[in-house]
Image: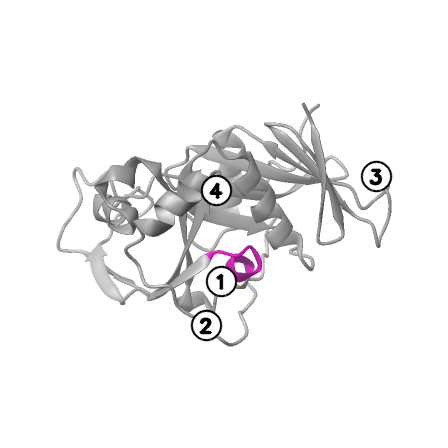
């Protein structure tokens, strides 16, 4: 059954696979302010991730979502299992390692005000529960993680810069045949965590949380300018 609720002046209408939202200050449902968030096949994100996202790589994807504006896809978000088993067991212990997923890509064509935070919030509501979501903001791109702060993620500090094996466009799990002498610099990243579940599940996650809860980083995030548009923009209904 669909559920309607109010959030920050927006009206949500949702079911398991779709969420609509509009800004009441700009218009009513059916007008040009209508957005729709839907679960989409992973393959529908590939053009976006390879052509428009700065990483230029397709990560491991378990869940993919599209943001539609007037029936045109204007953004994608993907979730997947982190490559590091140490990360999965480190956040809340081995008991909850299978619950850990990474919000590994957020990509928007227009990136209008509040668009990213509403999109991220909608996908969190649509995920299978319970889950522990981790995500990163890349300092090399001038990102602070403002969207995660707006969505009430927990900030746990920044990772240390490092070098590791250059996997090219391969996922870190797929290391067979790689030249281990080739190293790639990995910049420091701000790390954020979010608990998805009911009150009891969230309380249990928090009681087993192994990372420090820190103040959000201060400053202004840089915007990544998109110079190309992905081929997969229109969704056939």
In the rendered view, tell whether residue 224 sits above or below residue 179.
below
Q: Alpha carbon of mark 4 to alpha carbon of mark 3: how far? A: 32 Å
Which residue is denoted by mark 2 in the rendering?
217
User: Circle 2 — which element?
Assistant: loop
Residue 110, percent across and down?
A: 67, 54
Q: Please say whether residue 112 is visible from this viewpoint.
A: yes
* Residue that numbered label 3 is attached to: 29
Q: Earlier in the sequence, mark 2 or mark 4?
A: 4
The image quadrant where one finds the N terminus is: top right
The answer to whether mark 4 and mark 1 are in CB contact below 8 A is no
Mark 1: secondary structure = loop
> Of helix, strand and loop, which one carries label 4?
helix
The residue nearer to you, when weighing 14 against 53, is 14
Report if residue 211 lies within the magenta region. no
Tell me which numbered mark, 3 or 2, is placed earlier along the sequence. Answer: 3
Question: Between disc 2 and disc 1, whose residue precedes?
Answer: 1
Q: Nearer the viewer, residue 195 or 228?
A: 195
Cα gap from disc 2 to disc 4, whole angstroms: 27 Å
Of labels 4 and 1, earlier in sequence is 1
Compared with residue 1, is residue 97 higher up or lower down, i.e. above or below?
A: below
Instruction: Check if residue 151 falls in the magenta segment.
Output: yes
Q: Residues within 10 Å of mark 4 (few under 14, many from 20)?
A: few
Front of the two marks 4 and 3: 4
In the rendered image, residue 71, in percent from the top left (x then y), is placed at 74, 35
Q: Which residue is mark 1?
A: 145
SS class, disc 3: loop
């Amino acid at each position: 059954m669909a559920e309607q609720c109010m959030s920050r002046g927006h009206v949500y209408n949702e079911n398991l696979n779709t969420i609509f939202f509009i800004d009441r200050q700009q218009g009513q449902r059916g007008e040009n302010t209508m957005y729709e968030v839907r679960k989409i096949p992973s393959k529908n994100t590939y053009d976006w991730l390879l052509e428009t996202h700065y990483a230029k790589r397709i990560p491991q994807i378990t869940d993919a979502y599209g943001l539609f504006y007037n029936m045109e896809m204007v953004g994608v978000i993907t979730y997947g299992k982190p490559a590091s088993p140490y990360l999965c067991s480190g956040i809340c212990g081995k008991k909850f390692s299978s619950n850990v997923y990474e919000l590994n890509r957020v990509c928007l064509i227009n990136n209008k005000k509040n668009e990213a935070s509403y999109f991220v919030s909608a996908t969190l509501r649509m995920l299978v529960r319970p889950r522990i979501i981790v995500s990163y903001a890349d300092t090399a791109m001038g990102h602070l993680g403002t969207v995660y702060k707006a969505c009430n993620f927990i900030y746990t500090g920044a990772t240390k810069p490092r070098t590791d094996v250059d996997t090219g466009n391969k996922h870190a799990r797929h290391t067979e045949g790689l030249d281990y002498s080739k190293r790639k610099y990995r910049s420091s990243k701000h790390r954020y965590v979010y608990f998805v579940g009911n009150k009891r599940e969230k309380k249990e996650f928090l009681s087993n949380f192994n990372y420090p809860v820190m103040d959000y980083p201060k400053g202004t995030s840089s915007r990544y300018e998109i110079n190309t548009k992905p081929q997969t923009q229109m969704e056939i209904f």
